[in-house]
């Protein structure tokens, strides 16, 4: 389903590559999508903090609106992807944990670093925050400094670690800081389920794995070992990836409930 969607969306995005050079997203790089993630949750946090008793459908609509707001003006394909991504992720949660399947030609070194990232985030409960962040930054640096690496796989890794860093900072702050706009609802759920597991490991990995899985789908669409992968793709592609991640972590934190 996702690969099919990405195939269609990639064609539409490539067709829209003639968007004016003044587009605010033109300089977007793979490692920058974590910033969009944080910006999106800043907006969502304000809505959740101000409104009570939101239904899941209302939450889905707000996530879709926020995700679509990062699209270039008039890009109908990007806006449609925002709503489809939200719907797919809210439905996908019923399937349980997402399994990451790497294509055979995915770069082995990048895959090893992604596995290291997963090991770092599993069982994370908010403690050793600085150590976890340090390890994630080390992984990012290794990815950036790779030589003779398949650039499509490298872009996938950089996009994913960018979200991992921003997601870890976001959800740790949301749990620990009473002033954080996402804090009230998370704490209110404490009696419903194991908060630490939900806030940390499950929610952060939902972010990370949605980014990784959909970036891999993109790599599968355009092919690896393409020297123009990172440079030829319009920034809209990276926005399409983060639209899945925003929805995935939202549903992991707040699904099946009234806020």
Image (tube, helix red, strand yellow):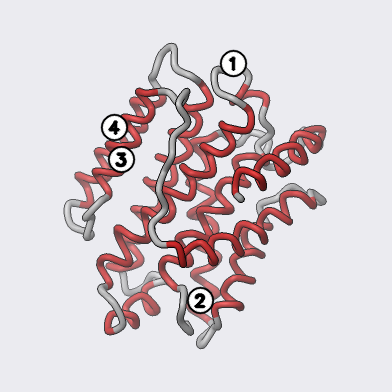
Of pointers 1 and 4, the one earlier in the residue sequence = 4
* View extreme (bottom): residue: 53
Q: CA distance from mark 1 to mark 2?
A: 43 Å
Image position, residue 142 (x, y; %): 33, 25
> Going 36% across and 75% down the picture, which residue do you hit?
186
Pointer 1 and pointer 2: residues touching (CB < 8 Å)? no
Local packing at callout 2 (Cα closer than 10 Å; few below 14, some 14-19, many 20+) is: many
The residue at which mark 4 appears reads as 138
The disc, 2 or 4, on the residue closer to the chain's N-terminal end is: 2
**Number of marks in the rendered image:** 4
- Label 4: state its secondary structure: helix
The residue where tag 3 is placed is: 117
Q: Residues within 10 Å of mark 3 (few under 14, many from 20)?
A: many
Q: Is residue 152 left or right of residue 121?
A: right
Q: Is residue 180 above or below residue 210?
A: below
Residue located 56% across and 39% down the image: 217
Sequence order check, earlier mark of 1 and 2: 2
**Which comes before the other along the chain, label 3 or label 2?**
2
Q: Is residue 34 left or right of residue 5?
A: left
Give x and y (percent) for residue 226. 59, 18
Which dot marks residue 227?
Answer: 1
Q: Residues within 10 Å of mark 1 (few under 14, many from 20)?
A: few
The residue identified by callout 2 is: 48
């Amino acid at each position: 389903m996702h690969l099919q969607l990405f195939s269609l969306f990639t064609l539409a995005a490539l067709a829209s590559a003639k968007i004016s050079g003044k587009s605010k997203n033109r300089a977007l790089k793979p490692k920058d999508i974590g910033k969009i993630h944080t910006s999106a949750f800043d907006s969502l946090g304000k809505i959740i903090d101000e409104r009570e008793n939101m239904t899941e459908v209302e939450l889905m609509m707000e996530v879709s609106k926020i995700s679509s707001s990062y699209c270039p003006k008039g890009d109908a394909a990007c806006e449609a992807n925002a709503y489809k991504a939200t719907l797919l992720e809210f439905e996908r949660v019923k399937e349980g944990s997402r399994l990451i399947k790497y294509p055979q030609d995915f770069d082995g070194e990048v895959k090893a670093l992604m596995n290291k990232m997963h090991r770092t985030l599993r069982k994370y409960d908010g403690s050793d925050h600085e150590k976890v962040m340090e390890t994630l930054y080390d992984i990012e640096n290794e990815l950036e400094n790779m030589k003779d690496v398949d650039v499509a796989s490298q872009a996938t890794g950089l996009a994913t670690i960018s979200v991992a860093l921003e997601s870890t900072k976001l959800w740790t702050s949301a749990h620990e800081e009473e002033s954080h706009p996402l804090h009230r609802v998370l704490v209110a759920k404490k009696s419903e389920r194991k908060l630490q597991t939900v806030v940390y490991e499950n929610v952060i990995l939902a972010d990370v794995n949605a980014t990784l899985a959909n970036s891999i789908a993109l790599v599968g669409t355009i092919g690896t070992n393409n020297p123009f992968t990172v440079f030829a793709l319009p920034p809209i592609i990276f926005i399409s990836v983060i639209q899945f991640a925003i929805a995935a972590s939202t549903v992991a934190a707040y699904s099946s409930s009234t806020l």
